[in-house]
Image: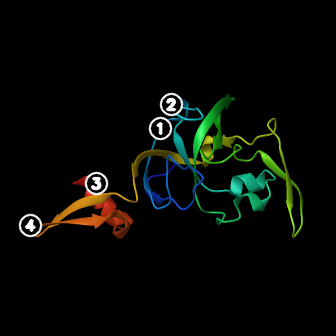
């Protein structure tokens, strides 16, 4: 699924997973075997995907992911899975999105409008090779962490931490 030298923390930058994940929340990546990943509209595991490039390669218009670069991970829920030969594939969807990822095909776009078509029979399933891992912990953006240094306790907003500080804090 993933390699050991990858990023372990991700900051949420969109509302696609609202209310489960909010802008500014930090999620921690963990590992699960593909066959152990739970699926479901409300209780499926939240996957961290490599990014939208796989969708682009399958013919999805870049308009669908226009606000992120091609290497920005997508963090969405696993709603279905299937095994083909020896490989697992996942259908994903943001909790706050109307349709599964890769199911809208842009038919026409002009400066005035975009006409898309929902195609439930042609939804793109993501291979497990595109899954970096699963979300194992969410640190809410509004949470406060009690931090002690030199015998002084103070509350520090999670947004003040960078990834290395969070990692060090969680190992204590």
In the rendered structure, are the residues bearing label 3 and label 4 in contact, judged by CB atoms less than 8 Å apart? Answer: no
Residue at 50% from the left image edge and 30% from the top image edge: 36
Lower position in the chain sequence, tag 1 or tag 4: 1
Few, some or many C-alpha atoms within 10 Å of disc 1 (few <14, some 14-19, many ≥20)?
some
Percent across and percent down for residue 76 are 58, 47
Q: CA distance from mark 2 to mark 4?
A: 43 Å
**Nearest-to-viewer mark from 3 and 2:** 3
Q: Is residue 63 left or right of residue 12?
A: right
Residue at 67% from the left image edge and 56% from the top image edge: 52
Lower position in the chain sequence, tag 3 or tag 1: 1
Q: Is residue 160 left or right of residue 84?
A: left
Disc 3 designates what residue? 170
Q: Is residue 145 left or right of residue 151?
A: right
Q: How are the residues colored?
A: rainbow
Percent across and percent down for residue 7 are 46, 59
Few, some or many C-alpha atoms within 10 Å of disc 4 (few <14, some 14-19, many ≥20)?
few
Disc 4 designates what residue? 151
Q: CA distance from mark 3 to mark 4?
A: 19 Å
Lower position in the chain sequence, tag 2 or tag 4: 2
In the rendered structure, are the residues bearing label 1 and label 2 in contact, judged by CB atoms less than 8 Å apart? Answer: yes
Element type at mark 3:
helix
Disc 1 designates what residue? 32
Any mark on residue 36, and which?
Answer: 2
Percent across and percent down for residue 16 are 60, 52
**Nearest-to-viewer mark from 3 and 4:** 4
Element type at mark 1:
loop
Q: CA distance from mark 3 to mark 1?
A: 20 Å
Lower position in the chain sequence, tag 3 or tag 4: 4
Element type at mark 2:
helix
Q: CA distance from mark 1 to mark 2?
A: 6 Å
Q: Can residue 87 be seen in the rendering of this structure?
A: no
Percent across and percent down for residue 84 are 70, 30
């Amino acid at each position: 699924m993933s390699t050991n030298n990858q990023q372990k923390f991700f900051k949420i930058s969109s509302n696609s997973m609202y209310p489960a994940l909010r802008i500014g929340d930090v999620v921690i990546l963990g590992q699960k075997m593909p066959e152990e990943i739970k699926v479901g509209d409300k209780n499926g595991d939240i996957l961290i995907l490599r990014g939208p490039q796989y969708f682009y390669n399958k013919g999805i218009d870049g308009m669908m992911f226009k606000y992120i670069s091609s290497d920005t991970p997508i963090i969405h829920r696993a709603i279905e899975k299937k095994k083909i030969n020896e490989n697992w594939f996942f259908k994903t969807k943001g909790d706050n999105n109307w349709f599964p990822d890769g199911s809208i095909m842009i038919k026409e776009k002009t400066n005035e409008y975009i006409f898309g078509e929902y195609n439930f029979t042609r939804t793109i399933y993501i291979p497990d090779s595109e899954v970096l891992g699963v979300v194992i912990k969410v640190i809410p953006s509004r949470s406060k962490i009690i931090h002690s240094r030199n015998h002084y306790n103070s509350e520090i907003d999670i947004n003040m931490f960078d990834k290395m500080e969070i990692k060090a804090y969680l190992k204590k």
